[in-house]
Amino acid sequence: MSDLKAQLRRYVEDNFIMGAGGPALGDGDSFLEHHVLDSTGFLELIAHLEETYGIKVGDDEMVPENLDSLDAVAAYVTRKRG
């Protein structure tokens, strides 16, 4: 899962943080609380997950427990691919 988490971190940093400076995003830090993603950002993240990892994110799965931190997204993708 560490490779997966590294890939996800790189995607989030490249597409949403874009060298904004400030403290590094921790694996368990909330994307919402740290203003990393907004509603459009979550839709972009979901599209990326579906395209890159070959999973389908259901409407009922679009919840913070699955998508609001690197830890949560990595665990979610692992479960979906398992």
Image (spheres, helix red, strand yellow):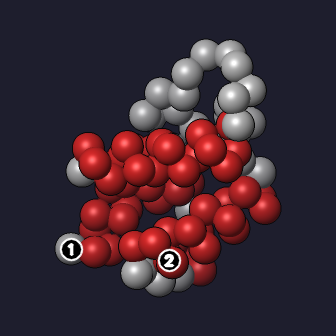
Q: Is residue 53 left or right of residue 12?
A: left
- Dot 1, how many residues are within 10 Å of its Cα: few (below 14), some (14-19), or many (20+)? few
The image shows residue 17 at horizontal and vertical percentages of 69, 37
Which residue lies under the disc numbered 1?
82
Residue 67 lies, with reference to residue 35, above or below; the image says below
Question: Closer to the camera, 8 or 69?
Answer: 8
Residue 70 falls in image quadrant? top left
Residue 58 lies, with reference to residue 36, above or below; the image says below
- Dot 2, how many residues are within 10 Å of its Cα: few (below 14), some (14-19), or many (20+)? some
Residue 37 lies, with reference to residue 29, above or below; the image says below
Amino acid carrying label 2: it is: Glu
Q: Is residue 47 left or right of residue 77?
A: right
Q: Is residue 65 visible?
A: no
Residue 77 falls in image quadrant? bottom left
Q: Secondary structure at mark 2?
A: helix
Say the numbered circle drawn on residue 50: 2
The image shows residue 36 at horizontal and vertical percentages of 69, 39
Residue at image point 28% right, 64% down: 78
Amino acid carrying label 1: it is: Gly
Say the numbered circle drawn on residue 36: none
- What distance separates the C-alpha of mark 2 from that of mark 1? 15 Å
Residue at image point 59% right, 40% down: 13
